[in-house]
Image (tube, rainbow, N blue to C red):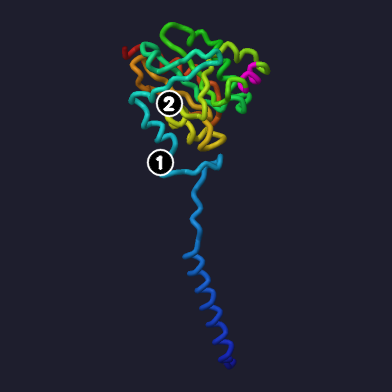
Amino acid sequence: MAKINTSTIIIAMLIVIVVGLLIVNGSKNKINVPAVDERGHPIAANSSAALLENFKNKPAPEFALADKDGKIYSLNELRGKNVILFFNEGLMCYPACWDQIVAFAKDERFNNADTIVLSVVVDPPEEWQKAVEQMPELGEATVIFDKNAAVSKRFGMLTTASSMHYGSLPGHTYVLINKEGIIKHIFDDPNMSIHNNQLVLELEKLSQNQ
């Protein structure tokens, strides 16, 4: 039997001890990196979808925002109408948000005495005019301007899954408020598609329950 060298055993034991200490120390100093989704948004204990659900069947936050001509649209004055708010990034969200805004303006199903669609953008009116010059159909839509994103924040629109500028700008989210000022439908769409047909179905549900 080959004689085992004592120094070799000691060196091996020292290596095992050092490696063990490094592993233990590394686990203690490990940095906890928050989980993020595919857009790099932090995934909280409550998802953004769950937070938005908390708004449903509750009174909508008050708002009063002006269009490019200075006309004020307020929740209080809109009582008696179904109100659809389309929160979006505005000028930078080309073409998805622009296409949705135009789709609302051209869809006769939303042009009636019972319903109003308001597209909420955070751009100043003079900046939004650049979009209208590029896509004139935008001028047919009712667009209201949310300075400093104050109303968007009140509605929880700055931390949705669709937001490309998480925490500072809305993404692509729809809020349906009934004639009594109660939020009945919220849909956040990271795919940024056109949501007209689903909103019409939601409006039909409201009319059936009246």
Q: In the picture, residue 63 is in which quadrant?
A: top left
Q: Residue at x 56, y 10 (%)?
A: 106
- Along the horizontal axis of the image, is 84 left or right of 103? left
At mark 2, the secondary structure is strand
- Along the horizontal axis of the image, is 67 left or right of 186? right
Q: Position of residue 177 (x, y in %)?
A: 39, 19
Q: Nearer the viewer, residue 165 or 209?
A: 165
**In the rendered structure, which disc, 1 or 2, sits on the residue that comes first in sequence?**
1
Q: Position of residue 23 (x, y in %)?
A: 51, 69
Q: In the picture, residue 39 is in which quadrant?
A: top right
Q: Position of residue 189 (x, y in %)?
A: 51, 29
Q: Residue at x 50, y 35 (%)?
A: 161
Magenta stretch: dominant secondary structure: helix
Using the image, tell me which numbered label, if any, was put on residue 46: 1
Q: Name the amino acid type tagged 1.
A: Asn
Q: Residue at x 40, y 18 (%)?
A: 75
Mark 2 sits on what residue? 186
In the current view of this chain or complex, which residue is farthest to the left?
Answer: 210
In the current view of this chain or complex, which residue is farthest to the right?
Answer: 134
Give neighbour class at mark 1: few <14, some 14-19, many 20+ (Cα, 10 Å): few
Q: Is residue 111 above or below residue 30?
A: above
* Quarter that holds the N terminus: bottom right
Q: Nearer the viewer, residue 198 or 155?
A: 155
| Separation of marks 1 and 2 at Cα, in angstroms | 16 Å
Q: Name the amino acid type tagged 2.
A: Ile
Q: Position of residue 53 (x, y in %)?
A: 38, 31
In this picture, which residue range is highlighted in magenta? Answer: 127-132
Q: Are marks 1 and 2 in contact (CB under 8 Å)?
A: no
